[in-house]
Image (spheres, helix red, strand yellow):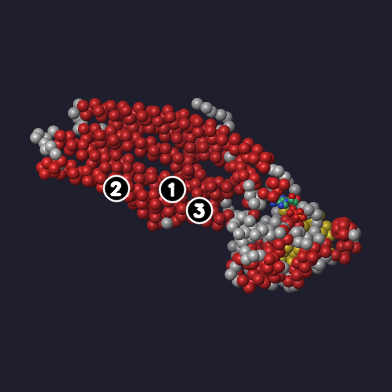
């Protein structure tokens, strides 16, 4: 049989069956999704489970009756004579019963699959919602971690993948009842046939279990590659990337990369599939041998007069059905154990807990802020990074002040903003707000009172109005408020140009979407900050694509509108920066200088140098 060193080891037997503990919370989740549908499918399946044995038994009665009638002396000739004689009445009733059972089985089957498909869809929706709800509670740090992304990806796949598991579990309940009913029949006639059955089936079961676990391990180990595969496919063909892919002629490069990854996938899957097919064939053959030994025995006993012809068909039928059922059940048990391993991914995702939390007795956010924010020797290193992004960072952001942050790329400006908004907590030092550590405040209130627009703000494929309303989504229907925010960020000119104004779908992903220019997007994004009644306003360089006049105007308004508010603005344009009350020059994650534009220019430091460089460019 083909084999290869690259297959990961199958998970241990214990681990595999240990995963079955996940079934309980899973079933609880199914039940919560819809108690009515769950109960209905169970009850109907139990009813349906008993139909096969009854059908087979009536079949036996029919044959026995026919055999008996054939032997009746002077039996009637035509159908009419048979009917008139009344001899075939019992046979008629049996035939009608058999027919009715067949119809019933059909109807029940259809209703069950209808209910199952409804239940599965609801379960998948409920799981997706739970996944999104849980993801929303987690830290930014988690999302930036590649391993977490693998885990999230695996969990996400489980939301739809687990529908098969549900169907499988329900079918198992049904099949077990059927098996018990057949086995009871068989035990009454020929107990050791059951033993023969078990011996013939065990190897197949163990084989299935082994290959299922191996396929899970393979899947698990390959999550990073699979994410890369998806990423490459997405990059090669998406509206966001099409422009650059064309200009740079990246198709070939991306396709090669895809093919390389996909080929490795295929090779590993093929190896496993071949081994599985090989062993599976062997085990099935063992089962078939078992069946024919049993068949020969039943035939022999019938010849010996121990069984009637009806018994022969009933027993042979029972044995064949039992074999198929048990084979199916064993395969599906082991696949359930395998699927339960996948549930681990889902439940372990739900167990990831955020570290950035509100304290138990949070302080209310100060309205208004009286003193401001104080950074005390703050140090922060991104997870897994060797370098400190900011360190020994100390400064005060006074209440009501407009502070500009300047510094070269990578100086730590954005990191500072992330710390201020508690997207991260400092590794060293602390940040105070009105004399108390930021961590003492209610997290939602803290974030709710900050209007922050990052340089990599999100371009939502939503209507223009919603793109602004996301700044305060619960005020989405307050059109006057949206209009005010639009006007403040000068997005009103953008809005006026859109064919459907506020209702215009923007972005190219959906039908009738209109794409905006970079600067137009920025104006829309900045309006989000004005949707909030925020105590602190922060613009982290979302203006880079604005033309000089627009940026100047945006910042002038920003300054005006930040009256009485505490504000931070980050920009590389000195014409804007100089409007701030105070400027903080960052270098290598720490404060190098601070003061007004005039003070800093006269100090002949980095600020003056950068200012000169930019000014020289315009002369
Ligand atoms: N998510 C992250 N994970 C790891 N390191 C990061 C992350 N974000 C930033 N860094 C690192 O932290 C340092 C500071 O980055 P930061 O984004 O704060 O700089 P910045 O001053 O805002 O730069 P720019 O002017 O380019 O926006 C950089 O050296 C960067 O490599």
Q: Secondary structure at mark 3?
A: helix
Left or right, 522 with respect to 292, comes to: right
Residue at screen point 38% across, 32% down: 201
Of the numbered discs 2 and 3, the one sitting upstream in the chain is 2
Residue at screen point 27% across, 27% down: 297
For the residues labelled 3 and 1, say whether their Cβ atoms are less than 8 Å apart.
no
Viewer-proximal residue among 524 and 304? 524
Looking at the rendered structure, which numbered label has been put on residue 103? 2
Viewer-proximal residue among 194 and 83? 83
Looking at the rendered structure, which numbered label has been put on residue 166? 1
Of the numbered discs 2 and 1, the one sitting upstream in the chain is 2
Residue, disc 3: 127
Viewer-proximal residue among 572 and 603? 572
Q: Secondary structure at mark 1?
A: helix
Spot occupied by residue 396 in the image (x, y as percentages of width and height): 77, 64
The residue carrying pointer 2 sits among few (fewer than 14), some (14 to 19) or many (20 or more) residues within 10 Å by Cα, namely: few
Spot occupied by residue 591 in the image (x, y as percentages of width and height): 80, 58
Viewer-proximal residue among 611 and 103? 103
Answer yes or no: is residue 612 visible. no
**Mark-to-mark CA distance, 2 and 3:** 36 Å
Q: In the displayed structure, would residue 182 be above or below residue 364?
A: above
Spot occupied by residue 241 in the image (x, y as percentages of width and height): 67, 49
Left or right, 597 with respect to 277, comes to: right
The quarter in which the C terminus is drawn is bottom right
Residue 402: quadrant of the picture: bottom right
């Amino acid at each position: 049989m083909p084999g290869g060193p690259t297959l990961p080891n199958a998970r241990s037997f214990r681990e595999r069956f240990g995963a079955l503990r996940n079934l309980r919370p899973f079933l609880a989740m199914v039940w919560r999704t819809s108690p009515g549908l769950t109960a209905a499918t169970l009850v109907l399946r139990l009813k349906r489970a008993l139909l096969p044995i009854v059908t087979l038994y009536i079949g036996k009665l029919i044959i026995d009756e026919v055999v008996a009638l054939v032997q009746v002396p002077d039996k009637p000739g035509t159908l009419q004579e048979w009917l008139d004689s009344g001899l075939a009445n019992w046979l008629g009733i049996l035939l009608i019963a058999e027919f009715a059972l067949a119809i019933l089985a059909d109807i029940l089957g259809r209703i069950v699959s209808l209910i199952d498909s409804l239940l599965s869809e609801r379960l998948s929706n409920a799981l997706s919602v739970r996944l999104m709800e849980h993801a929303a509670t987690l830290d930014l740090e988690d999302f930036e971690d590649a391993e977490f992304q693998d885990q999230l990806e695996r969990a996400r796949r489980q939301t739809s993948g687990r529908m098969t598991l549900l169907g499988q579990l329900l079918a198992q309940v049904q099949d077990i009842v059927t098996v018990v009913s057949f086995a009871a029949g068989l035990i009454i006639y020929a107990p050791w046939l059951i033993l023969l059955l078990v011996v013939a089936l065990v190897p197949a079961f163990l084989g299935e279990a082994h290959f299922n676990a191996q396929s899970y391990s393979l899947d698990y180990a390959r999550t990073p590659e699979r994410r890369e595969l998806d990423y490459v496919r997405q990059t090669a063909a998406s509206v966001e990337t099409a422009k650059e892919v064309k200009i740079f002629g990246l198709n070939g490069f991306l396709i090669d990369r895809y093919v390389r990854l996909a080929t490795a996938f295929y090779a590993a899957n093929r190896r496993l599939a071949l081994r599985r097919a090989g062993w599976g064939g062997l085990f099935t053959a063992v089962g078939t041998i078992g069946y024919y030994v049993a068949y020969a025995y039943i035939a022999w006993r019938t010849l010996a007069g121990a069984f009637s012809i009806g018994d022969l068909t009933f027993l042979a039928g029972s044995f064949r059905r039992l074999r198929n059922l048990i084979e199916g059940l064993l395969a599906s048990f082991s696949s359930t154990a395998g699927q339960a391993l996948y549930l681990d991914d889902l439940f372990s995702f739900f167990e990831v807990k955020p570290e950035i939390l509100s304290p138990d007795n949070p302080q209310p956010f100060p309205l208004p802020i009286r003193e401001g924010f104080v950074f005390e020797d703050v140090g922060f290193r991104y997870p897994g990074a060797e370098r400190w992004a900011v360190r020994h960072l100390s400064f005060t952001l006074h209440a009501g002040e407009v502070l500009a942050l300047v510094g070269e790329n990578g100086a730590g400006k954005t990191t500072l903003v992330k710390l201020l908004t508690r997207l991260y907590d400092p590794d060293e030092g602390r940040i105070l707000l009105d004399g108390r550590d930021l961590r003492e405040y209610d997290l939602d209130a803290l974030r709710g009172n900050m209007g922050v627009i990052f340089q990599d703000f999100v371009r939502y494929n939503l209507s223009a109005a919603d793109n602004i309303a996301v700044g305060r989504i619960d005020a989405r229907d307050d059109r006057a408020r949206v209009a005010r925010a639009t006007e403040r960020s000068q997005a009103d000119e953008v809005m006026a140009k859109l064919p459907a104004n506020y209702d215009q779908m923007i972005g190219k992903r959906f039908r009738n979407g209109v794409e905006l220019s970079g600067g137009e997007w920025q104006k829309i994004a900045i309006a989000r900050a004005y949707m909030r009644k925020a105590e602190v306003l922060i613009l982290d360089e979302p203006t880079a694509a604005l033309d000089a006049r627009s940026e100047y105007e945006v910042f002038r308004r920003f300054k005006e509108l930040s009256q009485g508010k505490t504000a931070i603005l980050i920009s590389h344009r000195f014409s804007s920066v100089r409007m701030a009350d105070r400027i903080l020059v960052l270098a290598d994650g720490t404060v190098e200088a601070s003061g007004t534009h005039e003070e800093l220019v006269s100090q002949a430091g980095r600020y003056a140098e950068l200012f000169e460089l930019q000014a020289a460019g315009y002369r």
